[in-house]
Image (spheres, helix red, strand yellow):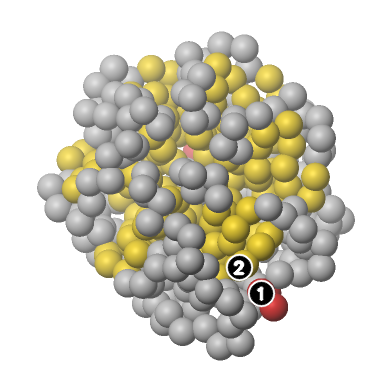
Amino acid sequence: MCRNIYLFFIIFIIFNCTSRNNQDLNLIYNNSLIIEGESHIKNISQLTFSGENAEAYFSPDGKKLIYQSHDGDSLCDQIYIMDIETGNTDPVSNGQGVTTCSFYQYPDTNKIIYSSTYQDDSACPPKPDYSMGYVWKLYPGYDIFSANVNGSNPVRLTSSPTYDAEATYSFDGKKIIYTSLKSGDLELWTMNPDGTNKEQLTDKLGYDGGAFYSHDGSKIIWRAYYPKTEKEISDYKYLLSDNSIGPMALQLWVMNADGSNKKQITNNGSANFGPFFFPKDNKIIFSSNMHDLKRRDFDLYSVNIDGSGLERITYFDGFDGFPMFSPNGKYLVFASNRNQKDRGDTNLFICEWK
């Protein structure tokens, strides 16, 4: 259920820049894009300028990003790697099927993982039918692949006839956590980097997904929706039978790496997703529409892992999401609708965190 928003080409020219950074990354800034109230954002740079780009995650050395993108409604998402300083971008998926949810194999900069439908069907699948409302498709052909960083030698890690996606590595490289319909419901599973030793961590009716490990490997943060009323349960099961899910009040949960001690950390009736641990693993940064009664505007928030200390980070009137801190903790990358060239564009931005 990763969002399908991505990129086809990059232009690394920014007008009205204000300064250059000589530490760690040499970037051109456009600080006019920082909105009043965004006190934690310093020296922002726009990295993409066209299409739908999302879920950008740092390489272990902090110099590159892996992300998913498409530019044009008729195209399917594919996986790309960008050199942050130069803006040079290379495709690493094969251009077939639809892809989503990519990540580096930490701590190795030479391996990646992503999900793709290409072995089930090389064609771009048809877009969902929105006539009965907005839905996300859980294409059964999605499987998780590992590959070399240039996309060569893809190895299939899952082979169930259902949705397998939303995979990320633990930062010691020993485990992959992902979402699967293998059990008949959307649950979190773990496996070894070679696809062996698959274990189910959740078992409550509803959606569990978008999980990340803490940097020390002791905890897992994820988003979840557990239907409660008869109608909620009926609606959820009906859509699931059609390999779909609809918009829902996703809440954030945290648990130990072995699946024990599950605790809910948000409870606001809104959609909360894209959680990622702060560098010291004491807080979570995530995206939410909790401030918007119409539920259309998403901004970044932070919260302590016990649910206290909620703080709003961004104030853009539109979409801000998919945040990740760089390995050294200095930078934050996220996707946003700000500074659109065309309606519907979602681009990638990087800033210093203060």
Q: Give the residue displayed 49% in from the left and 25% down from the top.
A: 216
Residue to which mark 2 is pinned: 44
Give the residue type that dot 1 points to: Asn
> Picture coordinates of residue 29 (x, y %)?
57, 74
> Picture coordinates of residue 221 (x, y %)?
58, 30
The residue furthest bottom is 15
> Picture coordinates of residue 127 (x, y %)?
45, 64
Q: Is residue 310 above or below residue 28?
A: above
Which tag, 2 or 1, sits closer to the chain's start?
1
Q: Give the residue displayed 59% in from the left and 32% down from the top.
A: 280
Check if mark 2's residue and mark 1's residue have beta carbons within 8 Å: yes
Q: Give the residue displayed 20% in from the left and 54% down from the top.
A: 151
Q: Quarter of the image holding residue 250?
A: top right
Residue 202 is at least partly visible in this image: no
Q: Quarter of the image holding residue 160?
A: top left
The residue furthest left is 153
Q: Give the residue displayed 66% in from the left and 29% down from the top.
A: 282
The residue furthest front is 22
Q: Is residue 282 above or below residue 100?
A: above
Q: Is residue 302 above or below residue 95?
A: above
Residue to which mark 1 is pinned: 31
| Front residue (pair 255, 39) | 39
Give the residue type that dot 2 points to: Ile
